[in-house]
Structures are given as C-alpha cells and as structure tokens.
Amino acid sequence: MLRGKEYRETLAGKKVLVVGLGKSGKAATRVLNEEGATVYVQDSSTSDRLDTQFLKYMDNEGIAAFLGSEPDDMSIYDMLVLSPGVPSDLAFIKEAEKQGAEIIGEIELAYRISEGNFVAITGTNGKTTTTSLVGKIFEDAGFKTSIVGNIGNPVVTHAEETTSEDWLITEASSFQLETIKTFRPRLATVLNITPDHLNRHKTMEAYAAAKANVMMNQKDDDSFIYNADDETVRRIASNAKGRTISFSMKGGSEPGAYLDDSKVIVRDADGQEYTICDTDDIRIIGDHNIENVLAASAIAFFAGIEVEVISASVKEFAGVEHRIEFCGKVDEVEYYNDSKGTNTDAAIIALKALEKDIILIAGGDAKNQDFDEFAAALEGRVHALILLGRDADIIEEAAKRYGFTDIYRCKDMPECVRKASELAKPGDKVLLSPACASWDMYDNFEQRGRHFKSCIKELLR
C-alpha cells in the first residue's frame, strides 16, 4: 500500500464522499479537497445545525453536500471516508460498497497520507490519560510528536506534513478501528476491555474484535503492549504478529512494565530491570492510573526512550481534563469532574479512586449497559445519588434493587450541582461521573464537563 506523497498523488480526481461532519469529517474534507479529490459530504443534520463557517468553506470550494438526506446514486464514488460516529452498516454505505467504493475511516486516511510513525492506544477506559502521558514522554524525549485521534485532535490534520522522523501518538476508539484496512502502528496497546458501546457493537465479542483490529497489520518488528491482568486482552495478545510486551499490577517475568510492591518497574528483553518511580510519585489518583502509568512506561521504554526521561515525565504529569479532575473546594467540599466516565466501569473506577463520602451525579444516554455492578459499587462509597438525563430511570431501578434509596432527580446540571451543595457536608466529595454518554443533553462529554465546572464557579460567587 502506498503511503505519504505517493498515496496523496493518487487522490487527485477521485470522487470521495465524506460521511459525518464532526471534527474528523471536516478535517478529512479539507485535506481531500487540498489533495485534488472531488469531495462530497453527507451528514444526517440539516444545514441550520452545522458549523456556518464550514458551510461557507464548502460553498466557496464547490463541495456538494447532502445534509439531512442521503445521496441517491452511490455508484459514482471511488471511496467513502466515515467519521467515527457513523455506523458502517447504513444502507447507503452498504450500497456504495456493493457498487465498488472503498470504505475507510479518517484514521485509515491519515495513515495513508502520512509518512510518520504511529503509536495506537485503545481500550475501554484510560485511553486519553495514557495517550496524553505517552505524548508528554515522547515530547520530553525530544521526538517530533503529535497527540491525536479520539482525544479530540483529528489525526488527518497532522498527517500531511509528517516525515519518517515524526511520531503520532494516537488515541483510537473502537469506532475508528472498525474501518481500518492498512493502518499499522509501530507500537499498539489494548489497555482493558469492559462493556461499552453495546448499542453500536451489539455484543462484547464484536466490541473486543474492533479493539483487536489495532494490531491486525503489525509485523514482526512492531510491538503489541497488553494488559496481562485482563483476560479478554490476554486472548487478543495471543494472536499478535509482533513482539508482545505485557504490563501488570501483579508483577511478572516477561519483558514489560510491572508493579513491584510500590515501585513501577520496566524489564527489558534480557531480564534487566529499571525503576521508573514509586507509586507515591504519581500525581494522578487511583489504582487505574497506576495501570495507565505502567502502560505508558512500557510503550515509551520499548520505543527506545531513556528510563530517566520516562521517570521525570511520569512524576510531572498532572492528568487531563474531565478525568477525575479536581475542580476546587467550596465550604470544605471537594468537587471532581469525571465527565469522561461515559460507561459503568469508568464510573466505578472513579468511585474507587475517591473511596468514600461521595455525592455522585450520574445519568445520560445509557448505551444499553447493565447497571447492576455500578449499583453494587455505591454501597459504602456514595451517600447520595443525583440523577439526570434520559436514562435516569434505568439507573434508579438498578440502585433500588441493591438497596440504595438516597436518590434525587434533577432536570439539568445547574440543579444537580445546587442539590449536591445542599446535601454535602464538610469532607464530602461531589463527583460527576455519569456512567453514561452525554448525547441526550450535550454535544459531547467535554461540553458536559465544562458545564459542570461553570456551575461550580457559580457556587463561589
């Protein structure tokens, strides 16, 4: 498969339909247009709900758009580029494929037009934190680095200008990995797999298979870094084509990264061990973040980065927005934004990290999840549960089945924060960790998290 300049030259004159006008769709449209493709776009939203500046760009460039509708003739397209949120089984997409069009996603397009080296990080939880930390380590080591992907920065935006010296540290979602064809990361990892996005993938087997795609094109000289403590991930690793490198909270004897009492250790292929840091040196809270540090340390070490650089970067890293983010203290009550907690497992992780005396704000789009394990985790940790959003009933029913009844219903985020402040006593922690997607009320989890933080600022006035 051609890459870089050679591939970009093949795009001239190709008829390409970009499906979905989110961040990655808009970025793909611009790049394809610049490379001389004849670009069309489709989005389920009508023009009044889309970015007016981008609509003006399309009009100026003569880009045909199907907004709130679907193209009639799918035989004219050479290729479709799907945004991550777009299911590949839509009828018009299947028809295009039947007519001979190639179906890829933005991450595949970015790989083809790039000459850079990719690190791909996937898993149900911890992707953004691990991607951010790996990116910091690579930057601190002096590598030419871009932190891209599901973290909110379209890969294709940075791909065009890369050379063989560049590294693209890529957070890859299951949606993005569904549509890869030739994407080959030099280092790839699956952090963990727990139930999520089952409204899209239908089964856990299909969800895990999408995650496993991250390593499907790797060769002998590539590396697959995997969580040895996760049974599903271990099964995926057994099919790896490159060298396998494990990380574990329980120690280990293979090359990789391990927790040895309170020390983060990396072990090379010859069995030589190096200490990265003590767990007390890690600024991001919770056992799950120790696991993220292990994964990041293994990735960086086997990319050839010096232990001293990894150690310094880990000790400096203060975390990322919307991931158990400390937002301040009001009347001796701490407030935490974990809006990225979009599934039950992520919310349980946040509850365990904060331990007890928690007032929890949860709810939203449940994505067909089972909430029994989440409900069971409330006992001993949460003394009030505040619910909002479309599927609040589902969460309330599960909580009551497990004997938790201190439940309050609110119509929106400001009311949730006000209620939490009324219920809280000194020493309590108010935590937004919704266990649900945000799409029923917000454009994305970032918007939800920012709204939560703005409500906290109101308490300070």
Image: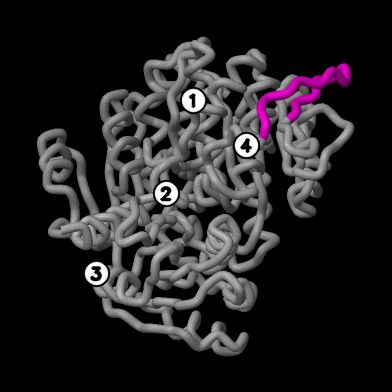
Q: Is residue 194 left or right of residue 404?
A: right
Label 3 environment density (alpha carbons within 10 Å; few <14, some 14–19, many ≥20): some
* CA–CA distance in space, label 1 to label 3: 35 Å
- Which of the colour schemes (rainbow, by chain, secondary structure, one colour) is used? one colour
Quadrant hosting residue 307: top right
Looking at the rendering, the stretch of residues picked out in magenta corresponds to: 265-278
Above/below status of 123 relative to 414: above
Q: Residues under labels 1 and 2: Cα distance?
A: 18 Å
Q: Nearer the viewer, mark 4 or mark 3?
A: 4
Q: Which mark is residue 136?
A: 1
Determine whether label 4 and label 3 are within 8 Å by CB: no
Which SS does the magenta portion mostly show?
strand
Q: Dot 2 corresponds to which residue?
A: 325
Element assignment for label 3: helix
User: Upstream in the sequence, badge 1 or badge 2?
Assistant: 1
Mark 1 or mark 3, whichever is nearer to me: 3
Q: Could you tell me residue 270's position as x and y percent?
A: 87, 17
Q: Could one spot residue 26 in this view of the protein?
A: yes
Tell me where residue 381 appears, x and y as whole percent: 57, 70
The circle on residue 280 is: 4
Q: Is residue 279 above or below residue 146?
A: below
Do we see residue 197 in this rendering?
A: no
Secondary structure state at the residue bearing disc 2: strand
What distance separates the C-alpha of mark 1 from that of mark 4? Answer: 20 Å
Q: Quadrant of the C terminus?
A: bottom left
Q: Name the residue under label 3.
A: 414
Residue 233 at x, y percent in the picture: 74, 48
Kindly report the distance in space between the C-alpha atoms of the residues bearing marks 4 and 3.
Answer: 36 Å
